[in-house]
Image: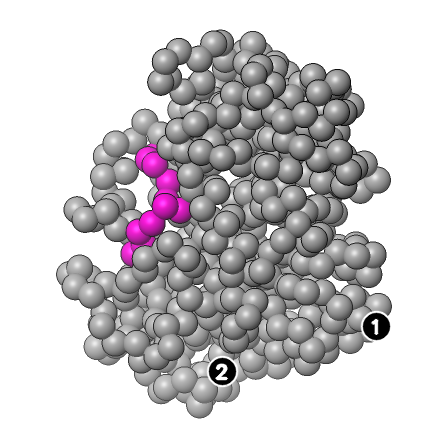
Amino acid sequence: MSPLFPALTNDPSGRPALRFGERSLSYAQLAGAARAVGGRVREATGPLAGGRERGRVAVWATPALETAVAVVGVLLAGAAAVPLNPKSGEKELGHILSDSAPSAVLAAPGDELPEPLRALRRIDVDVDERGDAGRAAAGAPLGGEASDEPSDDEEPALVVYTSGTTGPPKGAVIPRRAIATTLDALADAWQWTGEDVLVHGLPLFHVHGLVLGVLGPLRRGGSVRHLGRFDTGGVARELTDGATMLFGVPTMYHRIAEALPSDPGLTRALAGARLLVSGSAALPVHDHERIAAATGRRVIERYGMTETLMNTSVRADGEARAGTVGVPLPGVELRLVEEDGSAVEAYDGESVGEIQVRGPNLFTAYLNRPDATAAAFTADGWFRTGDVAVRDPDGYVRIVGRKATDLIKSGGYKIGAGEIENALLEHPGVREAAVTGEPDADLGERVVAWVVPDDPQSPPDERELADHVARRLAPHKRPRTVRYLDALPRNDMGKIMKRALPA
């Protein structure tokens, strides 16, 4: 297999690779720092034996330059990185450490680590250290002891833990093959090159921020500028100063949409961007339209998950259709299935089915969970995503929710919560909305809307919201019950946590 990051092997030009705030590294400097980390990882994990994987190393994944250097160093050493959420509680951290059994933890000097990590060997990441500095300065290729990148593309690269909504988090083992194929497929879909400069403020313990947002630019030979913490001023500054792409989650784009009317600088900056990409949850159509109206630029969406990396995307040369996640990426097979496993044949924009995918972008297994791994796949190798969707006649995919929480069976209809949420958000009196199903003696399930009103003192009434949805969608999709909240529960990536809604 070719190196994951070809630009690290021979780049005497001094091109910028990473920038976090005022701190930055060129490709040559990153190569040297990552080599130094790789050398320490090799010491911690021991020598490679024939055909044996090197092992796992935890990374304290703060939004800092050290995290990016640490992960690249682990990958160059031939080990697998286990990114840790710095906001995780001690119980969750204890489970992840017990399950993944890392031989060391990488962290920035001065970072105070919680109790569960203190028993591990600690490796401080010095971004100014230069492993094999003479070779790096000369632009010599990585080789010999400078890199242990495996030749087998099935070797683990990352172990990323799922959110654990239905039990303890599971560690998805992501091979090098999945990272390379996903990033190359996105390069095709987004016309992503080494000339692109990406800006984002995403966490670095998830696929979105780490794989797409850091490893993606490095594989292309481009640059990433991380904001540390998202704010619209930082977005405007970086896009005005040469950044070409913006990655974000819906919460971030909502804040952008809210700021645009009073911030002409932000409007100009977004108008000049080559690509605006949203992911990790559905971007409400209302925010799509507000951004497009103000800037002339359409946000494009893609669809993926921890176990599959990326499955679909709106293409840079395609139609940026609000409310869809585009078409399957090169190399990815996608199908919709009924509850009995039969295929949904109709591409009519209405027939709902569970998404199943197959391709080189998939994870290898859940670590130490052969039962869960077997249950996640069909007999013929399709991964059961648990997401439900419809397909338009031209193949565009529209996610309507999660099978477990967002597929509502009411009055003989299958209803996706996502389209009702989008309709509710088009009402001027609704700031946030979530939709769930609840048991109903007559309908089987009734549609319940959870609404954060724009004006808590004067919320839209239940009948008004029901009629609003019925006019936009269909009468059977209207909410039968509306409940008002001050805020919706969300996780670190901005996804609504429906299981945390009040009983």
The residue located at (29%, 71%) in the rendering is 352
Judged from the image, the secondary structure of the residue bearing numbered disc 2 is helix
Rounded to the nearest whole Å, what is the CA distance between mark 2 and mark 1?
A: 33 Å
Mark sitting on residue 116: none
Three-letter code for the amino acid on which mark 1 is drawn: Pro
Whether residue 114 is situated above or below residue 229 in the rendered picture: above
Whether residue 393 is situated above or below residue 367 in the rendered picture: below
Residue 2 is a magenta residue: no
Q: Quadrant of the N terminus?
A: top left
Q: Mark 2 highlights which residue?
A: 465
Mark sitting on residue 264: 1
**Residue 226 placement: quadrant:** top right
Which residues make up the magenta segment? 356-366
Q: Position of residue 327 (x, y in %)?
A: 42, 66
Residue 247 in sight in this render: yes
Q: Nearer the viewer, residue 221 or 372?
A: 221
Q: Nearer the viewer, residue 78 or 103?
A: 78
